[in-house]
Image (cartoon, helix red, strand yellow):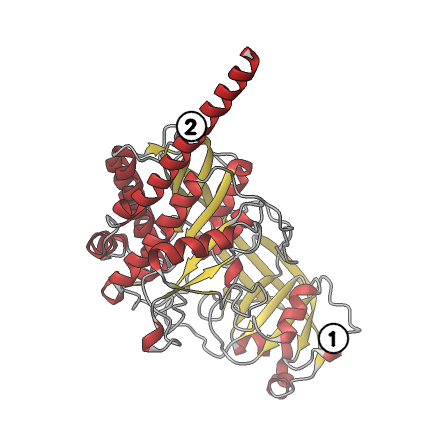
Amino acid sequence: MIVFKTLNMRRFLAIILLFAVSSLYAQKKSDATTFAKTITPADLKRHLFIVAGKEMEGRETATPGQKKAAAYIESQFKQLGLLPGNNGSYQQFFEVYQDSLVSAELQVNGQSFQLDKDFNAGNIIQATMRFSEVVFVGQGAADSLKNISLAGKLVIIIGSTGQGRNPFANNPVYSQLINRGVAAILIVQSNYPRTTAMNRTGEQTINLFRRSIAPQQFTISEGVAKAIFGAEFEALKTNATAVKTFSANTLLDVTKAVKVLQSSNVIGVLEGSDLKDEYVFITAHYDHLGKRDTVIYYGADDDGSGTVGVLEIAEAFVKAKQAGKGPRRTIVFMTVSGEEKGLWGSEYYTNHPLFPLEKTTVDLNIDMIGRTDGRKSADSLNYVYVVGDDKISSELKPISEAVNNKFIKLNLDYKFNDPKDPNRIYFRSDHYNFARKGVPIIFYYDGMLGADYHRPTDTPDKINYNLHAKRAQLVFYTAWEMANKNEILKRDIPLEIPRGF
């Protein structure tokens, strides 16, 4: 009898405890609305006019503008009382490397040519190369190259001036040459002599040691081409299918310096309670394209909107904790840099995680939530594109949709959710580096790929702040659910990483 009574008492206490926890959890869910309302259009606008303001100079990675933006985000995390996410620091630094051209030389049969007047080095590979032969390849000669060995050769293409360092990047012959092991490519352009000096810096990279080296590339004047081809030059200009070898002693010499720069992710942490050793990540990238000469690329929507969304969501959670309604799991608010360069900041974080990825239940990534897709009609603008919620955890999409239906009632548009979609949106923002490590993700996106995308005209005055706030509130509600549910999300859908990643 005594044993029976003890067992009954234990069951009774367990039921009471379960009821108390369930009631507390239900109360937490209802409390979410109170704190979601603190995410306001006015506050988003106030932050965004700073983050996407003139002083930030477009926030290009590893520039003073990016560092100013990082300092602002850090100051906001400090004001909110978030803990520093990197062993006492709010920033996780990573190195960025950039080549700088020191000198370049081009000679043909002993004749020296002049930098800017006659040629420019393209991808700044430090090397001294000497060739006794040059292979001319017409732009339409792709089929003719199939049975020709080009490994170690110097090749010339002639044609239109094109744009940028590699004006033939989309040409099938050029693509073949890159993959056929040629040593160097000379690209003939008609816009020489140059009246102003070309940019002497190369592209930035985070990989100082590379798996492979691309061919050396020079753009050259028609004068250099005539020194190689002689009287045949004019005929070759119009012969798109020709492949012909010429004897010419050609020297290509490049000397470079490597600048070691620095960028950072900014990380603030709100510690959870009984599940504090599990984590919810809320991310956005704060970098953009910087400036070209004096023209600033403001990046208000891309991704100033996501960045200030993170700030406002963080404030809402801090107020909840101050009111005794804090999250069970620890929430990590992380704004990353280098996204526009190739998802660098999130790649660095997921390769050097500060919190266990296996204990990270979800990454909610926000990249462009302030404007609307010009392809949508005026009566269908109450939406957000949702990407990736069905890729790793079967639990995530039902939770996402239930939260939206209960609190926000946006149209969750899955147009870009297919990895095979030609826009490849699933692979184009920082959530993907979490996904490839097996962390469930949701990516929130407005689809703004119109005239202002990656243009100086992406400015904060064009943001729809009411819709911006509504989307940020959806992320908050979803994070609230993720932070307070009893179990970490299942990872029950096989991870598929496409070739090339």
**Residue sitting nearer the eye, 258 or 33:** 33
Q: Tag 2's secondary structure?
A: helix
What whole-number distance in Å separates the C-alpha atoms at marks 2 and 1?
A: 79 Å
Quick check: 278 above or below 184?
Answer: above
> Relative to the observer, which residue lies in front, 227 or 198?
198
Disc 1 marks a residue whose amino acid type is: Leu
Give residue 189's position: percent from left, percent from top. Answer: 51, 76
Say left or right for 169 vs 84: right
Q: Secondary structure at mark 1?
A: helix
Q: Is residue 45 left or right of residue 61?
A: left
Indicate the amino acid at tag 2. Ile
Q: Which residue is situated farthest in the top direction here?
A: 2
**Residues packed near mark 1 inside 10 Å, few (<14), some (14 to 19) or many (20 plus):** some
**Residue behind mark 1:** 145
Q: State the image coordinates of residue 66 (x, y, percent, origin top left).
A: 33, 49
Q: Which residue is mark 2?
A: 16
The answer to whether residue 202 is visible is: no
Residue at the right extreme? Answer: 147
**Disc on the earlier residue, 2 or 1:** 2
